[in-house]
């Protein structure tokens, strides 16, 4: 297990394709992801790269005229991380931290579930039904959120 964590710590995430990232996450256990997330610096490096990829993997043609602020609260052992994605005018902008703007939906999930979700290794409906993904706000928007992004398959 320590080998998996150290190999991830050595990765240059900007050089890893979305498909390769999905394969890496698929190969990690929940415990390994929790151990990875325990290193605050590595955790934030991974989260920042994931959210940067959201901007690149956004599908403006599918989003159409959607205007929505989506707040992501990723719960961790030591502290929560908050990111926001704002979809408007055919663009997706990501920011770190909580703004004063009102979100249309807030998604709350732990590190392992977040990484599994964004790498295409988990079903969001199943996660919601098993309470691993909590949603506040527009549940309808949340149900279709994955279609706005090109999510890799491992």
Image (cartoon, rainbow, N blue to C red):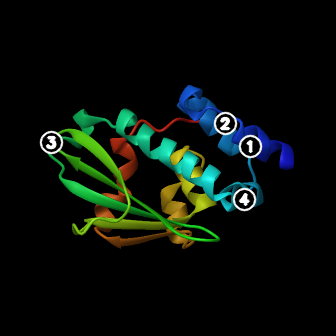
Q: Which sits earlier in the primary sequence, circle 3 or circle 1?
A: 1
Q: CA distance from mark 3 to mark 1?
A: 37 Å
Q: CA distance from mark 3 to mark 2?
A: 32 Å
- Residue positioned 52% across, 50% down in the render: 47
Whether pointer 1 and pointer 2 mark residues with C-beta atoms closer than 8 Å, the reply is yes
Q: In this image, 85 relative to 101: left or right?
A: right
Q: In this image, 120 relative to 92: left or right?
A: right
Question: Which secondary structure lies at badge 3?
Answer: loop
Q: In this image, 39 relative to 145: left or right?
A: right
Q: At which x and y percent is residue 105? A: 31, 66
Is residue 75 placed above or below 113 in the rendered structure?
below
Checking the image for residue 107, the label placed there is none
Q: At which x and y percent is residue 81? A: 49, 63
Question: Which secondary structure lies at badge 2?
Answer: helix
| Quadrant in which the C terminus appears | top right
- Residue positioned 63% across, 30% down in the render: 20
Q: Is residue 154 visible?
A: no
Q: At which x and y percent is residue 83? A: 40, 58
Residue designated by label 1: 27
């Amino acid at each position: 297990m320590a080998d998996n964590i150290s190999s991830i710590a050595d990765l240059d995430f900007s050089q890893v394709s979305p498909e390769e990232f999905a394969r890496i996450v698929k190969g990690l256990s929940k415990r390994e992801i929790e151990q990875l997330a325990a290193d605050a610096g590595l955790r934030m490096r991974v989260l920042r790269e994931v959210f940067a990829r959201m901007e690149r993997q956004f599908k403006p043609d599918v989003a159409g005229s959607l205007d929505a602020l989506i707040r992501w609260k990723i719960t961790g052992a030591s502290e929560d991380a908050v990111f926001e994605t704002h979809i408007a005018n055919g663009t997706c902008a990501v920011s770190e931290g909580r703004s004063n703007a009102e979100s249309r939906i807030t998604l709350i999930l732990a590190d392992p579930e977040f990484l599994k979700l964004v790498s295409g290794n988990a079903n969001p409906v199943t996660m919601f039904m098993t309470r691993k993904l909590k949603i506040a706000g527009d549940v309808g928007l949340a149900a279709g959120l994955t279609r706005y992004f090109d999510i890799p398959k491992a």
